[in-house]
Image (cartoon, grey):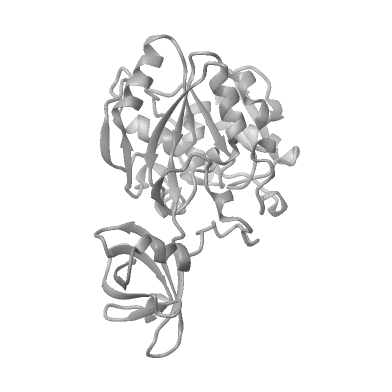
Amino acid sequence: MLLTDFDYYLPEELIAQHPLEPRDASRLLVIKGAENPYIHDLFSNLPAYLKPGDTLVFNDTKVIPARLLGIKPDTGAKAEVFLLSRLTEDTWEVLVRPGKKLRPGAVVVFGDGQLSGEIMETTESGGRIVKFSYEGLFEQVLDQLGTMPLPPYIKAPLANRERYQTVYARAEGSVAAPTAGLHFTPELLADLKARGIAFAYVTLHVGLGTFRPVAVENIAEHRMHREYFELNRATAELINQTREQGGRVISVGTTSTRVLETIADTRGRVVPFRGWTDIFIYPGYTFKVIDGLITNFHLPQSTLLMLVSALAGRERILKAYQTAVAEKYRFFSFGDAMLILP
């Protein structure tokens, strides 16, 4: 398939710049079955589409304030360091700007000197390896000096950084939010639980590779960047039990989907596992575990759009996106949601 097969028209004014309050006030476009028309609803009515015995699978990763703005002490020039993944206690793989000025040996200082970083080497992908120096705990220093790494299409400042976290976020390590989960409130979760819906949790630390543009016309040639994930024994047992008892496994977001599909066997059973995944799901893929998906609206020509197209069909998804544009749904990270029940 070609990259242009996953293009669609989106007016810029439909790109959501702010999260809604409350979180579950977002709209919900439901795709249910192959022949049924689209259903327009509110996310707060999600429980109406689920059944006792279903299991929702959430990604409990927590976004870190990964963007650091500093200066080069030798010149006073501004510099930006964007954390990608932790390699050791004090060493990270990062992206830097301006790249030409931040070569091995360069030093960047942040805040009033509470944190400094030395560029150690350049990675194959053009990033950098940085060794940080600081006093105390790195997490506390980062929380003080870092800012939330909002996607570039969000131009408005974020008044409350907790609105770029899910209410169940626990495991720090992502540089982007698993945005399908941003719609859930504690009250909605309590309602779902009271109706007999089970909750399972996986962890996948979202990296920038998930969102990088596809640079090849033949999408089969695209290679995903690796992301770290964990699935524990309790989650594995619950998912396997749900399937054995005839319940549905419904993934909250593409990240949870990628974890489950990475480790499932051909029968759809999963086992406890921790490691790295670079799975790329696009049309032609046969899903092994999930029976449904809650997801936001994704960028044109993105790997995320390809994943939802693999689940519901490319033409049906693109028609749904056209409908969402016509109905003025809000798009991307702070936008509205879809529920796909093939």
Residue beneath the point at 27% across and 81% down:
105
Residue 99 in the image, given as x and y percentages of width and height: 39, 75
Residue 316 visible in this rendered orientation of the protein: no
Residue 214 visible in this rendered orientation of the protein: yes
Residue at the far front: name it.
136
Residue beneath the point at 39% across and 29% down:
285
- The image shows residue 74, relative to residue 208, as above or below, that is below
Residue 11 in the image, given as x and y percentages of width and height: 70, 51
Residue beneath the point at 56% across and 47% down:
299
Camera-nearest residue between 306 and 42? 42
Residue 290 in the image, given as x and y percentages of width and height: 43, 24
Image quarter hosting the N terminus: top left
Residue beneath the point at 49% across and 17% down:
54
Residue 86 in the image, given as x and y percentages of width and height: 30, 58
- The image shows residue 227, relative to residue 44, as above or below, that is below
Residue at the far right: name it.
327
> In the shown orientation, is residue 75 left or right of residue 157?
left
Camera-nearest residue between 10 and 117? 117
